[in-house]
Image (tube, rainbow, N blue to C red):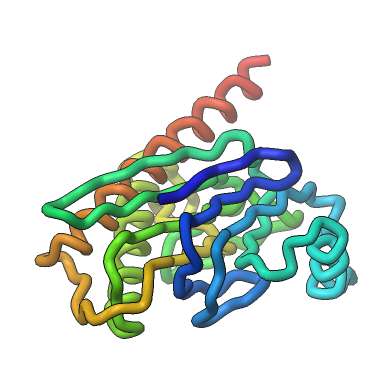
Amino acid sequence: MIRTTLTRPWLEARFDTEKRVLSWAVNKPGFALADRIVWREVRNADLPVDLDVDQWLSGELQRSGRTDAVVFLTSRDVSAFVVREHTCDDISAQCVATVGLSNAERVGHRLQRDHQSWGTINIAVGINVGMTDAARIEALTIAAQARTLAVHDVGLQLATGPATGTGTDCIAIASPPGAERYAGLHTAIGEAVGRAVYDAVLQGAQDWMASVREVADV
């Protein structure tokens, strides 16, 4: 259902057919039709405070022929992406995630930082069943819940308490248009989405924590 292609600084998750996507991504946010979700890896130096990010990204997308894609930005090495899938009954959800926690936060708090750091969590979820927009919104909340639990379970401690996410996380939920109205925790969609996202984010967070320890030990 999702085919991933890595050509740094780009990571592309392409669907077998065009999907209806819900996200707050920097390109094509809200409800959009797309056949792929794309990551653009950046360095902190690529995004100075006075940069017009929309204009810069528009140029990057035009040069690479990706103006039609839903797009994430991250400073996480995109080659560290994780793919997980879970099936419940006949419902399958696939999750592609990149996980960086360098600007981690605890919900309800904000740390004062003296530098910019954009090692964020970006999550793309493809679901194989046709859904209404209301169900798509509900599925997005399940994905957010799964992300938060995974980050909590990895045990990153901040001055404000255990981390629950980062300041720049983004989630995109994609599925065919259809009649399915519900995607909560009691549904097969909710189980499939929740498990796929939890497993992907937990693995990605563990990988990031291990990479930080390796650097600290050098």
Vertical placement of residue 140 versus 43, above or below = below
The answer to which quarter of the image holds residue 60 is bottom right
Q: Is residue 3 something one can see in this rendering?
A: yes
Residue at (58%, 63%) from the top-left corner? 168
For residue 124, above or below residue 184: above
Residue positioned 79% across, 63% down in the render: 61
In which quadrant will I find the C terminus?
top right
Quadrant of residue 57 within the rendered picture: bottom right
Give left or right: position of 81 versus 193.
right
The answer to whether residue 155 is visible is: no
Give the side of residue 24 with respect to residue 173, left or right.
Answer: right
- Percent x, y of residue 24: 55, 74
- Identify which residue, 76 or 102, lies in the foreground: 76
Give the residue at x 27% y 66%.
129
Quarter assignment of residue 7: top right
Instruction: Give the left or right position of residue 53, taking residue 207 as reference.
Output: right
Which x, y percent locates residue 81? 54, 39
Residue 210 on image: x %, y %: 51, 26
Residue 63 drawn at (x, y percent): 87, 60
Is the residue 67 above or below the residue 92 in the image? below
* Viewer-proximal residue among 201 and 92: 92
Residue appearing at x 76%, y 54% in the figure = 115
- Extreme-top residue of the structure: 218
